[in-house]
Amino acid sequence: MADYPEIRAKVAADLQTRFDRVDVTYKTVNNVSLQTAIFVPKTISSLTEATAAPVLVHFHGGGLITGAALDLLFLVDWVRDLAHSTRTIFLSPHYRLAPETPAVHILDDIADFWAWVHSAHLPATLITHWPHLTADLTRLAAVGESAGGYLALQSALQMNQAARLRAVIAQYPGIFPDLAAFNPRPAEPDAGLDKVVEGYVSGLEAGVVRVSTAWPGFAEVTMAAMRNGLMRRLFGEDGKGRLTLGYALGKAEQVPPAMWVIQGTEDGLVAKGAADELVERVRRERPGAVVKYTVREGDHGFDAGSSLGDEWVAEGVEFVKGYWLKLAHQAIRARELFLLGGNRRRLQFGPSSALRNVRTVAEWEPTKDNNKTQVLWAFLKPLAGYGCKLAPENDTGGGSGSGGRHQMDTWQHNGPLQDLQT
């Protein structure tokens, strides 16, 4: 990608033509605002009737040490086209960059971003600019390239109780520090490259926050670290190992969101071996996980020229849509519904084709009036917004205070989409 200004101008023109945009702050650190861009396709921003749109969140790449939201150089055509064709609210947040900020605190930024998404702030922003538009957070997915794919996967694994994702698209994301093939130290390190990295790290000033460095900014330090196996040095201290895949899998739900991992065979920055290990470990340690792994010939960013019409892209997009968008008007079988003991009761159900990632669907204080009708309503109310048919088996016994297992009668509701309360 040698023609950086030309590529950025082309992408900027495309976004301006097809989307409306606002930028809002979701977090402030040391008086520095961390903003997210909100893009709304003009095909829905121009409507007048009430519209609930799905949401797609994009995390930018750059090895956690460079990049910007949006770095128009790396926001590939097919991702923009996906957001536009699905009439999706498209968000892309800034986050702090290493080494000024230890990379583990980037995870804190992402967690705070998800809290912002599910707070009153996003609806308030939308209603200010597009009064007819609401975000349907029951249809929420994330996408990212390189480090952005890593952050999308971290969101799906260790943060999904907060993120509530249905699906993830991760392009060449294998930068988890515990992956064997990620940024190994060469047998004969280049002393000059070590000097570049150590010189920058030793000169850092406390309290400095950097949130945006569009490529090729910071290229000298980035490439020195990549070539000499020093990315972990730039990531900084991580005492609890929160940056690692092992930690993320330990925090993950038994059935995490569906994942589409994309990797190039000749990737010189994020080795294919790292993606291979990533996919293998997710499948092994979370057997219920649904992971589609697409390997194509090419280097880092090989999909820059791809389109939604390409067979491999179309196949992956249809896979993702099946989990991200096709939730309404599908049967949900509550075949493993539990009443958990203690001072609160929590209703849960096991994997289903329609909502395989939802676990807790209702919580309430137990009282003497918790009869079957009220328990049934407590279970069904959060599902009402899906316009779904609930089709479990008949009640199998066990009272609400017994910790028994229950399965309930068929019920159907055709209401508007709304946020799932968990």
Image (spheres, grey):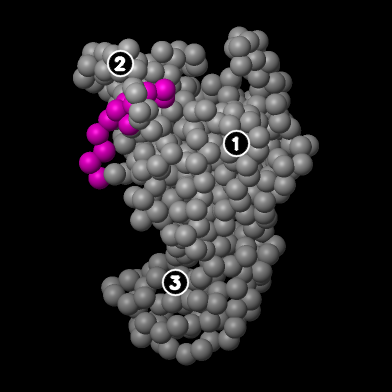
273 sits left or right of 96 in the view: right
Residue beneath the point at 47% across and 25% down: 62
* Magenta stretch encompasses residue 234: yes
Q: Quadrant of residue 50?
A: top right
Q: Which residue range is magenta in the image? A: 226-240
Q: Position of residue 395 (x, y in %)?
A: 53, 87
Q: CA distance from mark 3 to mark 1?
A: 45 Å
Please, what is the three-letter code of the amino acid marked with disc 3?
Answer: Leu
Q: Position of residue 404 (x, y in %)?
A: 41, 84
Element class at badge 3 = strand
> For mark 1, what is the residue?
265
Element class at badge 1 = loop
Please, what is the three-letter code of the amino acid marked with disc 2?
Answer: Ala
In primary-sequence order, the first of circles 3 and 1 is: 1
- Circle number at residue 347: 3
In front: mark 1 or mark 2? 2
Q: Residues within 10 Å of mark 2 (few under 14, many from 20)?
A: few
> For mark 2, what is the residue?
191
Residue beneath the point at 45% across and 54% down: 281
Q: Position of residue 204 (x, y in %)?
A: 24, 16
